[in-house]
Amino acid sequence: MTEQYLEGGFADPPRAAAHAFRAALQALSRPGRIETLSGATPPAPCSPAAGALLLTLCDGTTPVHLGPSHDTEALRGWITFHTGAPLVSAETAAFALGTWEALQPIHRFAIGTAEYPDRAATLIVEMPALSATGARLTGPGIETEARLCLPETAAFQQNRARFPLGFDCFFTSGDRVAGLPRSTRVEEV
């Protein structure tokens, strides 16, 4: 195991994981709101925010899929060392990491079942930037409306139409994260 796998985890794991969990919870419960999430220094091309999400939400029982944009030896080793999460195909993943393009086709990811809608995948989508502009978001956790730049709107509209089934998303860029749960309505503006 090389040194690059050992470095880049949380310096103070209990405190950093609690902070990261709170930021992730805020991001999903308030869709479109951009939170700061740092503390991890994963290997490129993984952002600090995506790395912090993986360190906080994944463990040895959480299957993770890496899209081609993020499927590097260094990142595989880092995830394995720090979380113990098994690296799997898209169809069996609880979490998936990559750019939007690299995660296509998204129909491969689990959307849950009528009995267990919570068995859906969560996508961690790396973006070039995050901004509160673009698509209009409405629904639970949003007082009137929110805006968020999304890689597209049609896929999220189709995802919402399947509610309570569907995947949830985190969008990350640098040390910033925003959430888009499957319950959110998305409109192109």
Image (cartoon, helix red, strand yellow):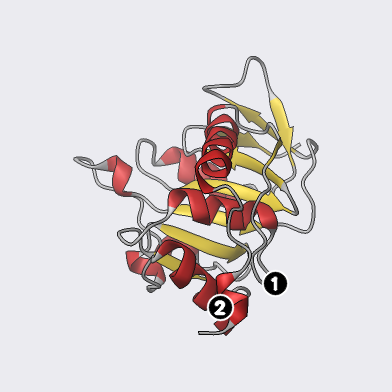
**105 up-or-down from 182: above or below:** below
Quadrant of residue 59 within the rendered picture:
bottom left
Q: Position of residue 46 (x, y in %)?
A: 65, 65
Q: CA distance from mark 1 to mark 2?
A: 10 Å
Q: Is residue 166 left or right of residue 115?
A: right
| Label 2: how many Cα within 10 Å (few below 14, some 14–19, many 20+) | some
Tell me if I can see residue 72 in this picture.
no
Q: Is residue 184 above or below residue 155?
A: above
Q: Is residue 93 left or right of residue 105?
A: left
Q: Amino acid at mark 1?
A: Ala
Taking the spot 53% from the left edge, 28% from the top edge, the residue there is 29
Residue 51 to residue 185: above or below: below
Task: Give the number of the mark in front: 1 or 2.
Answer: 1
Q: Which residue is mark 1?
A: 44
Q: Which mark is residue 71?
A: 2
| Image coords of residue 44 (percent x, y) | 70, 72
Q: Nearer the viewer, residue 90 or 50?
A: 50
Residue at left offset 54%, top offset 34%: 28
Residue positioned most to the front: 12
Q: Which mark is residue 149?
A: none
Q: Taking the image as drawn, is residue 78 in sight?
A: yes
Task: Name the residue nearer the viewer: 135 or 91.
Answer: 91
Using a 10 Å C-alpha cutoff, classify the residue at mark 1 as few (fewer than 14 neighbours), some (14 to 19) or many (20 or more): few
Q: What residue do we see at 40% from left, 53% from top?
A: 121
Q: Work out which residue is located at the far top of the displayed protein and give it.
A: 143
Query: Tag 2's secondary structure?
Result: loop
Residue 5 position in % (x across, y down): 56, 75
> At 68% across and 31% down in the image, what residue appears?
33
Residue 176 as seen in the image, left or right of residue 61: right
